[in-house]
Image (cartoon, grey):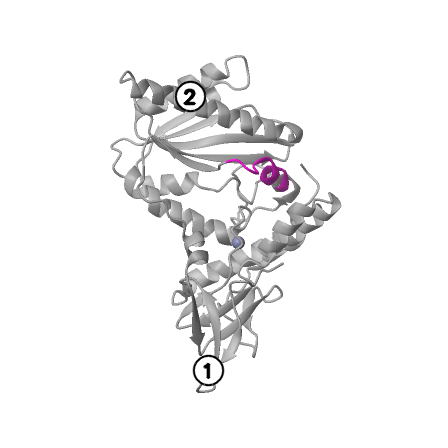
Amino acid sequence: MGQFNTLGEIGTNKSGQNSILVTGKGSDLSNNKTLKGKAKRKTITQSLMRNLIDIAKEKEDVLALGSYWNTYYCQNRIIEADGRSYGRYCKNRFCTLCCSIRKAELVNKYLPIIQTWEKAYFVTLTVKAVKEDQLRRAIRKMLKGFTEIKDKHRKRWQRRNGRRLKGVRSLECNFNPKTKTYNPHLHLIVDSKETAEILINDWLKKWKAGGTNKYAQHMEQIYNAESGLIEIIKYGSKIFTEPDLDKKSESGMPSQIYLAALETIFSAMKGVRIFERFGFNNGQETDEIENNLLSKTKLVTDYKEFEFDPAKSDWVNTCNDEVLSGYDIPIKLSALLTNGIDKTSR
Ligand SMILES: [Zn+2]
């Protein structure tokens, strides 16, 4: 499957030390909290992937099966050298390890711009909840509708007779386990109240024949651009869908993960853009994961090699018992991943 292709040959240099080829800048290992967070995400991801692999096998979906395995092995083997860790990222949307990097990247990229908007507004545009078999179509229809609105105003603005709509938008979909329905929606941060109003009005006009109503749309001023931005970038879906939407149990942990529903969402969103900006440029487009893959390989000596051990929820040194992060999985999370995964509701 080639998941180890960025970590290269092991050789011996003149002084007899072992050396290994690594790719990219690597990640800083000095912050143990970050490292433990990574171990937690790796644990969750592997557990979800094991179950998604079962689902894909049942559906005989060979393509999905390959991607899930790829994500299963994301950052599975880590080389530690010079206080940095090197490993391979799978770059899949449903990988919590890769998504957390993407999220941080998007925040770094867009926060400085959003902070210059005097009165940024948060907007939610929704359509009626749909059943599983309608989701793919509903998502495409929504995005098409949004693009049409955006383009109409861009053309007007170019003819100097309208306002340029500026913002970022993110697509999200939640599952309601009670009604077994999905509610795809767009979260936006826009530059002004005027833009927010135009979008909601035009959205309602688009769906005036039914499909949504004005009470399901939402706008409010943002006072903290950073938390606002983090709030909208969930990369498609919350992994943990609550039985009572957005209501967590006392422990702060949900009691169930609706994995089959999550799989429905991922597959319905395949090939569509989850996040985009409109009405402004942001200079250079960068992609840290991509850059990391394109950057040069280098030879490191005096390295340690770790492999992820699901039983320990941590990476373990391949030569001894040393663990990389020291992460201890909380009992509640462990119980959730063992007994709380619902593989049938969708
Ligand atoms: Zn990944």
In the image, is residue 163 above or below residue 289? above
- Residue 280 falls in image quadrant: top left
Residue 133 can be seen, yes or no? yes
Q: Quadrant of the N terminus?
A: bottom right
Q: Position of residue 47 (x, y in %)?
A: 62, 55
Mark 2, Cα crowd under 10 Å, few <14 / some 14-19 / many 20+, is some
- 241 or 234, nearer to the observer: 234
Per the rendering, the mark at residue 13 is 1
Q: Could you tell whether 199 is left or right of 243 in the image? A: left
Query: Distance of mark 2 from mark 1, alpha carbons?
Result: 62 Å
Say which amino acid is labelled 2.
Ile
Q: Which element type, helix, strand or loop, lies under badge 2?
A: helix
Residue at 54% over, 12% down: 209
In the image, is residue 256 above or below residue 26? above
> Which residue has dot 2 on it?
149
Q: Which residues are magenta?
A: 263-272
CB under 8 Å between discs 2 and 1: no
